[in-house]
Amino acid sequence: MRSLRNCLTRVALAAAIAAGAPLAAQAQSLQALYEAARGYDATFLSAKALADSARYRAAQSEALARPSAALVGSATATRIYPQYGPNGDSNALAGSLNGQYTLFNRSNDATIAQARESLKSAQADLEAAQQDLIVRVAQAYFDVLGAQDNLATTRANKVAITEQLASAKRNFEVGTATITDTREAQSRFDLAVAQELQAENDLHTKRIALDQLVGRSGVAPDPLRVPVVLPAPLPDDAEAWVTVGDTRSPSVRRARVALDVARLETEKARAGSLPTLNAVASVGTERDTGNYVLRAGTNRTASIGLQFNLPLYTGGAVQNRLEETLVLEDKARNDLDAARRGVAQGVRVAFYNLKSGLAQVKALEAAEASSKLSLEATQLGYKVGVRVNVDVLNAQSQLYQTQRDLAQARYNVLLGTLKLRQAAGELGDADIEAVNSLLAQ
């Protein structure tokens, strides 16, 4: 029993040493690192800038429904050399203010409606980018924790094998064991050294990835709070999540917007055969000078009226454009069906992966308890001579491997929870806070 407690103590110490940083280093929460990534990750910032630009793009289309005005000016100087008579000149200086307001234009109405729909699509794109950032940060965060746990158990296993190797050598020297026990322990020790080197490198690369994502160096993630309590999915029904995903998923919302835009494009094509009506007005002044001007002086003008335009023949352009938009509308409808089916499949897969992960955690927790009891019994049997050295080594390796797998399974469940909510389009900042509350602060 004492030997088992020593093994578990070594696991705890190794977990602290595996961080690769001074023990006094301040750990950072998932919430803090996510906030850092929001201000640093280039992929998310690019998506945010694109979403911000969408409202300006929509405002450009809104201008089609507003009046427009333009100031026009001209100045001309003409020198005249007639065949008979004296030379002369004719000079003109003119300026006008022209205004226009659209009274009826179905094509412009459709364009404005399309621009407004594009804002919905831009918002969906931004939400998708934010949800992707949450998952990427959590993945990198738990990758580091998993690598630390792997290194900790690898080092603890190596320490236990070292003690078993020393015991085998002592027993061989006094004649109570064969050289086989020593060689088996030595081979296990050499393998443990190789595994430790691999685990150290894996932890190093995982830390580099997390540092790069959040724009910080030497990040030390908070571990899970003990005892670990993993949340179950609510609602606990795959089809309920599918229903949520059908309305909330950014990909489905984008596809719905695309279908609406395609329908508006068809309306715009039909508008190509409809008349347009504009109100126009103009005020201006013109000053004429020179000896070849019929009436020198300043003239002022003002006008107001309506401009009516009705296409009579366009060479088939309007009709062919209409046929094209109808086909593209069918394409958008099929794209929406594909998006809905893809989201439904993704949600179901994420849900059942999460349920399987929760069951696996329970099984591994039971396996950990059994492995501890098995190691105690094997160590006792080795002392009384009914078990050999390799049995102890196997029991130790089984315990450490189970503890490593259990830790990784817990991280997978937390990631699975976030991925399920991402698949359903429900992932947000509140989910980061919920996971963060499970960490040791």
Image: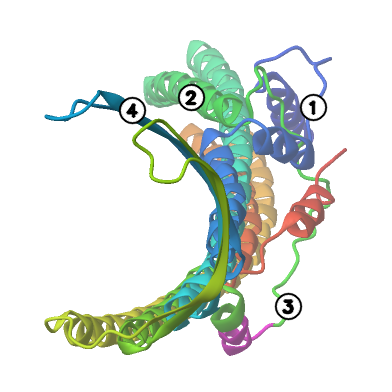
Q: Position of residue 430 (x, y in %)?
A: 79, 58
Q: Nearer the viewer, mark 1 or mark 4?
A: 4
Indicate the amino acid at tag 4.
Asp
Q: Is residue 275 in sight in this rendering?
A: yes
- Precedes in sequence: disc 3 or disc 2: 2
Q: Secondary structure at mark 2?
A: helix
285 or 145, which is in the foreground? 285
Residue 237 lies in the magenta-colored region:
yes
**First in sequence: mark 1 vs mark 4:** 1
Label drawn at residue 234: 3
Contact between labelled residues 2 and 4, with CB atoms less than 8 Å apart: no
Assess disc 1: are there few (<14), some (14-19) or many (≥20) residues with their C-alpha within 10 Å of its C-alpha.
Answer: some
Q: Which residue is mark 2?
A: 205
| 399, above or below 336, in the image | above
**What residue lies at 68% left-to-right and 58% top-to-bottom?**
365
Residue in view at x 54 percent, y 18 percent: 171
Q: What are the residue bounds of the magenta stretch?
A: 236-244
Contact flag, marks 3 and 1 (Cβ < 8 Å) = no
Residue at image x 57%, y 31%?
213
Judged left or right of residue 243, residue 4 is right
In-image side of 261 versus 157 (left or right): left
Q: Which mark is residue 27?
A: 1
Q: Pick whichever of labels 4 and 2 is earlier in the sequence.
A: 4
Q: Say which of marks 4 and 2 sits in front.
A: 4
| Label of residue 89 in the image | 4
Left/right placement of residue 28 relative to residue 315 reads right
Q: Earlier in the sequence, mark 4 or mark 3?
A: 4
> In this image, 340 relative to 250: left or right?
left
